Amino acid sequence: MPDHALPALAGARTLYTADIGGSFIRFAACTHAGELVALAKQPTPAHDWTQFVDTLSAMLAAHVDGAADAALALSIAGLVDPADSTAFSANIPCITGRKLASELGARLGRPVFAANDADCLALAETVAGAGAGHRVVFSAVLGTGVGGGLVANGQLIQGAGGVTGEWGHGPIVNTQCQPEGEPEPLYVPRFACGCGQRGCVDTIGGARGIERLHVFLNAASTTDSPTPALDSHAILDAWTHADRAAVRTIGVWLELVADPLAAVVNVTGASRVTVGGGLAGSPALIGRLDQAVRSRVLHRRDEPLVVPGRFSADGGLIGAALLARQASNR
């Protein structure tokens, strides 16, 4: 949690917010002064709607004192249609097809707001984080997989079906690249994606993607012994120590990820790209990605474009609270 109040979160009254992933629900209060206070953490009943509602109800009953109708703002690991709040989530199947705002609101007896977790992160970074002061901000999530969100003029952009900023999906990854130090172009296949397509950024851009690239690139170039299946942390550590195999992997990763991210910048006009997710924990990697993207965009600049986000852990909670604050002020 932030160690001080965030003015952007201040409001007339306290509201409550939950970051709901496939494994856990994190529950917090957003006070009238703008302070985010952690209250509880419970396993997510991902497959049972009744248990899902009961868990949220129990959290509210245990921690909400004297504010029976206080709003509940949700950051969800899944899509939320802005038209009617219908949800889709592979990780939380019990909410798929449910109209979260109206159905939960009726069951819990309070206003409910819900949005995709990457969208919430984008709003948090724009209003109170690394994107503050920029008119158009794109939030690129580089975690286990790849996601994103878009904010313009301080307002979250929510497209049809809740799909906006999803640069992680779509067959847009190059199959050939030539990173620095490679004498010949390297071929990378369009790997199959969980969304049903092939060649999505999600297949190579996140932590699992770096691991997949490392095995493919270095096993293919080594005949005497197989490349060990290292995790992304080990690969990045080896890269910082100039390990030849890791340098090859990260070089290819930078080329393949920088191309579509530069396209996102050109299409949206973003002047700041904030990076969330586990890979944002490597300043060296994000610094190199920034250089690669800036060399590819139409509007060249000297100042950083792609930067680590401020809210690595609490962006979902903060963004959901901001969304509810904005809605209540309309």
Image (cartoon, rainbow, N blue to C red):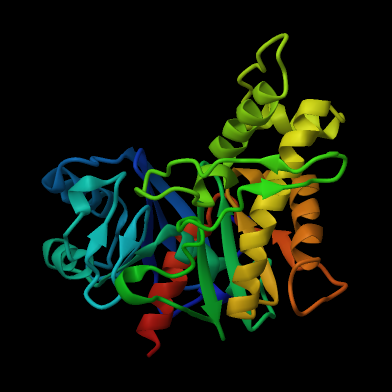
The answer to which image quadrant residue 115 occupies is bottom left
Residue 44 at what x, y percent from top left?
A: 29, 41
Report the quarter where the C terminus lies: bottom left
Residue appearing at x 65%, y 53% in the figure:
257
Counting from the top left corner in percent of width and height, residue 260 is at 61, 61
Pick out the residue farthest to the top: 224
Residue 89 position, x and y percent, is 29, 52
Residue at position x 24%, y 42% in the image: 46
Residue 22 falls left or right of residue 121: left
Q: Residue at x 61, y 53 (%)?
A: 174
In the image, residue 292 lies at what x, y percent?
78, 58
**Quarter occupied by residue 243:** top right
**Residue ID at (21%, 53%):** 95
Confirm whether residue 4 shows in the render.
no
Q: Nearer the viewer, residue 135 or 262?
A: 262
User: Observer-nearest residue: 30 or 147?
Assistant: 147
Quarter of the rendering containing residue 138: bottom right
Q: In the figure, 178 relative to 78: above or below?
A: above
Relative depth, front residue between 79 and 293: 293
Q: Nearer the viewer, residue 45 or 214?
A: 214
**Taking the image as drawn, is residue 236 in sight?**
yes
Q: Is residue 223 above or below residue 32?
A: above
Counting every numbered tag in the picture gives: 0
Residue at the front extreme, as displayed: 184
